[in-house]
Image (cartoon, rainbow, N blue to C red):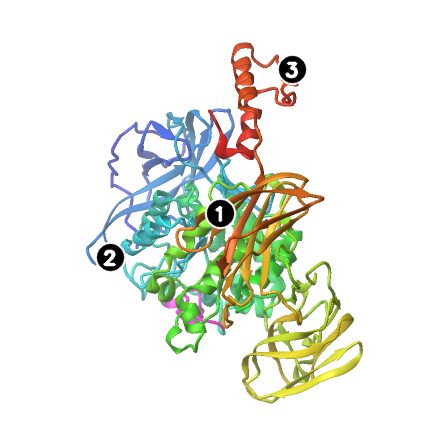
Amino acid sequence: MFVSLKNQLYIPILIVSLFAVTATAQTEITSISQNAGVIGRYEKFELTMTVSESYSNPFDTDIVDIMVTFTKPDGNDAEVPAFFYEEYDEDANGFFVNGRDPCWKVRFAPSQLGAYEVNQITIIDHNGTSIVDPEITFTCIESDKKGIIKVDSRNHYYMRYENNEPYIPIGHNVGWWDADGTDIWEDTFVEMSSVGENWVRIWMTHFYQGTLLEWRTNKQYYGGVGVLSMPIAWKLDRMIESCEQNGISMQLTLQHHGQFSDNTNPNWDDNPYNIIHAATDGGFLENPEDFFTDAEARRITKYKYRYIVARWGYSGAILAWELFNEVQFTDGWKNNQASVIDWHNEMASFIRNIDPFNHPITSSSHGSGFENIWNLPDINLIQVHYYGTDTIKTFEQIALSLASFNKPVIMGEFGTGTECDINSLPEPQKTQMLEALELHNGIWSSFHAKSSGHLWWWDCYIEALDLYDEFTALAVYAENEDLADYNLARAQRAVSGAEAYFANPVLYDFWAVSTQTVFYLQNDYFPGMENLSRWLHGSTKSDYRSDPNFNLEMPEDGSLKIHVEDTADWCSNSLKVLVNGSQVFSSSYPAGSSNFIITVPLSAGQQSVQIVNTGRDWFNISSYEFAPNNLSNLNSTGLSGNDRAYIWIYDTGSQYGQTAHGVFHNEPVIVKGLDDGPYAVDVFATRGAGGVIDSGEADSVSGLLTYTLPDFSKDIAVKVRPLCIVDFDDLAIFCSQWLQNGPDLEANLDGIGMVDFLDYSTLANHWLQRCPENWPL
């Protein structure tokens, strides 16, 4: 399967020198070169070398392990793993041909300006340990690259690049393509970049041509268990380089659930690890859940992950290593959750220890029980998937419920599940899908919930209907924002009129057990929704029953609206509602009923409302809505701090399956909790090209700011920031004095109200934060 390195000389572009190893070790470096002597900050330095030995499996670190030590300008060392490499061509049909020039490479992205030295190469193989000093140096100079994305040290809900610029994820999934080659990927990334997208999530999968490194030999480019595909690795090089060129950050999903499932999207029968493929592909696992416990499976997985980190860890286009897509659908999670959690802990710790660039690590969930994964110290991002129609309130509830983990939250997949079957939908759903309403509401509501939302359906929906432009307005709205600076929290409701209170269960796993069933309204939401299952089970599943009880004060007469996604399809289903202990409603529904709302009248005043499943099986309930009769047609979600606010105001009827109310005239935005003083208000369009459509000023008095919005329909976004009141003459005097006299200016500064700004950089930073549009220098 592998081309032998013995007796083959790899001819690099630049031969630096040939080296003999130290002491008595036998393995030698037969050639070595570097891609350049001057490297831009955060750009790729690449070392290429050949060695005197060949290996039965150059990916197995028990057979050969090559590490390279870099000494940085500050004197500290960085240990970087090397990886085996082959070159390929891509023919006109998208196939990878002419495999050649086997060699070893190491990739490194410098973050410090100055001189670097490659001072040691360590080779451990059947000849023992060989240590070489290659005497290679390079110089790092400034560049326009931004570096690796990491969790913001100032505010762990956000991320930022190494160069300190903020990173706000905007984008959608592109799980795979059904075309061969790299052209379709490159075209996709160019299209995404053109509308302001900067995030993509890609599965390493065997589907179609494939993007994973390891699969069965009955598929082109693959060699069975533990044999990594060099043609596919070369393909991934091209994809990651295209992401780099287009400003796209890739969340790379290393495993997906079907590979190790006999039940959900099962691929186990075709998995090379399956023992039924022992003769052809080296399979050795009896059951899919053994992947998480078997020592040899873990060992092979680690050296595969080491290869991935070694080859692509240098790149700022890698946002995060995602260990698993929806691991709750694997047989391992079904049969032994503790082993899956332990596997995550071991793999996350392993990657953290070998990744010299410290990319964030995540996994993804579409169910319950993940708190033990989110709490792991080396899991840095929380990722949730949601499929349903009550996206706005659900995203807000998810973000609130996960805030205690103090980590960024990404809604890594969402959608209605109807995106690929639009023509079969009734109105208004068909029109709403064509107009990308669910996509629109998902990305705008998640931004204002201190998160980001990423639609799943890329090929049959976004690409097929050319919906890329839907991201433009949000990208314009988010541009140059550094949300971590302002200590933002959930904003209070910012529109007038009576509001509805929503309880949106967060546990989506059918077999999740609700650990909380009694809830109390606090301000305008019910805390604890992360503990409640959306599956209201009946008598046949008594161990999973919840029958939740909601306690609140209704400000006026209204109703409880139970939003039902669907019901069990084999029996009649029924429920009842108790208010303050007395039954006020009872009804039955045919098997398989779906997409309907149960409405139960409620009176004003204190209410204890319990919903009880009186049938045999389940209701799938997306939300419990407590709505006054005189309900406003507008609602809002947003973020606010002491002197900043970001508010998204939306028509409550402009949601999937509902009917928008039309044009709104002279509606106020009411921002609560700001420090008193003058503020600038910018109103943004949320569709098309986006941008500011109205600007003005308003005062916050006793923590209340009110501003009248221009006419709008469906939704609109508002930013509030301190109004810049600056005496430019005073600033000119200050700058002149600084340039002439240096920092010894306290007496003079006191006279112009700038005594706190004793250095120019502090003043500049302060000015840029408060008045960026008026920066005069």
What amino acid type is highlighted by mark number 3? Glu
- Give the percent coordinates (x, y) of residue 52: 32, 38
Q: Which mark is residue 95?
A: 2
| Towards the viewer: 550 or 233 | 550
Crowd rating for badge 2 (residues with CA inside 10 Å; few <14, some 14–19, many 20+): some
Q: Is residue 266 magenta?
A: yes
Q: Is residue 672 left or right of residue 311?
A: right
Q: Which mark is residue 292?
A: none
| Towards the viewer: 707 or 87 | 707
Q: Is residue 228 left or right of residue 360?
A: left
| Towards the viewer: 515 or 109 | 515
Earlier residue among tags 1 and 2: 2
What amino acid type is highlighted by mark number 2? Phe
Earlier residue among tags 1 and 3: 1
* Residue most extreme to the top: 741
What amino acid type is highlighted by mark number 1? Asp
Q: Is residue 163 left or right of residue 671?
A: left
Q: Is residue 571 above or below residue 37?
A: below
Crowd rating for badge 3 (residues with CA inside 10 Å; few <14, some 14–19, many 20+): few
Separation of disc 1 and disc 2 at Cα?
52 Å
Q: Is residue 679 above or below residue 552?
A: above
At 59% across and 14% down in the image, what residue appears? Answer: 743
Q: Which mark is residue 746?
A: 3
Q: Which mark is residue 694?
A: 1
Give the magenta range: 264-279
From the image, state whether disc 1 or disc 3 is nearer to you.
1
Mark 1 element type: strand
Contact between marks 1 and 2 (CB within 8 A): the answer is no
From the image, state whether disc 1 or disc 2 is nearer to you.
1
